[in-house]
Amino acid sequence: MTSSPVTCSQCGAEVHTATAQNGFVHCEYCGASVRINNFSPQKNQPVQSNPSTMNDSNLPLEYARLERPKPSPSLESSGCSVVLGLIWTIFSSVFVVVGVVFFSNEYIEYNRLTKEGISTTAIITGLNVDDSGDSTSYLVYYQFRAPVNGGLTRFENNESVSSGFYSSLWVEQKIEILYAASDPSISVIKSEFDSPSVIFPLVFSGLGGLFVLIGLGLLYGSIRAQYHLRLLRSEGHQTMGFIIDRWRDKDSEGTTIYFIAYAFKELGGQIISRAEQNHTLYQKYKIGDTISIRYLPYNPSICSRTSL
């Protein structure tokens, strides 16, 4: 029986008919039973007992025994990652700035009202409940008069208050407020006056800071990969390697993704293996095919499958 590669319908890895029994062969990666079409076992075929240097996929046995390496991003894709990391970092920084600015403004107004706040009476002009689904805000709209340049000027403001205080209010009711003497547009309902909360700006800026760190990590990794790519172009050694594995998988959205793995020997004889996601190479190569590799002789783990 001539051995030919067959693709596993479960994981996409190649299996071979050399070990088929009764028309089926087991996938060595996922354990699924794969049916062999047109299976015709040959009888009275002696079993070869001498070890061979090649297996049924023309892959040397020292390569065939390698475990499937963990996929990693290819160096060639690092250019796009630099742009993505830069955009991610800048966008995340906005959250940090917004949180800091929000707290700073709240604290400045609180400090001014504490130092120069003047008490006066305001009239409620409107009440409103804002129910956005995630939270409910109780808004009080009021107006008052304050001296400006020797005359009285009317000012209007609104404030979010507690539900208990809101339930005791009605339109045209008089309430006591505080306003800043140097800027009467800064005002607050006196019974609701308190130091600004740091929870919201802290959470907002904290999440932004976390995303900034992620973006910086992505940016660093991408710039480092670009540096390695330049080293490979100027100092890399070229050799031939073998495709040692190819398989399919599903991402979180159920989309099929394709992987390919290759290995090569560096000058000292050590075998280096690498895997990456690449649909084009998955379709182009089979297990046992040769592929051109370039690597750094002083650090063979830095390598690329393409001619640079």
Image (cartoon, helix red, strand yellow):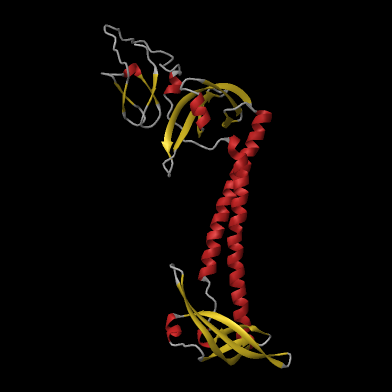
In the rendered image of this protein, does residue 78 appear above or below residue 237? below
The answer to which of 227 and 37 lies nearer the viewer is: 37
Q: Is residue 184 left or right of residue 44?
A: right
Q: How many marks?
A: 0
- Front residue of this view, candidates 154 and 109: 154
Residue 105: image location, x then y, percent: 62, 74
What's the residue at 44%, 39% (across, down)? 255
> Which quadrant holds the C terminus?
top right
Q: Note whether 66 is above or below 98 in the view shown.
A: above
Judge whether residue 49 can be spotted in this image. Answer: yes
Is 278 on the left-hand or right-hand side of 308?
A: left
Q: Position of residue 159 (x, y in %)?
A: 54, 80
Q: Is residue 300 visible?
A: no
**Residue 190 at what x, y percent from top left?**
54, 87
Q: Is residue 2 above or below residue 160?
A: above
Q: Residue furthest right?
A: 149
Of the 4 image quadrants, the one containing the N terminus is top left
| Quadrant assignment, res 95 | bottom right
Q: Is residue 183 left or right of residue 305?
A: right
Residue placed at 58% from the left, 66% from the top? 99
Q: Residue at x 32, y 16 (%)?
A: 38
Across and down, in percent, residue 146 comes to 65, 90
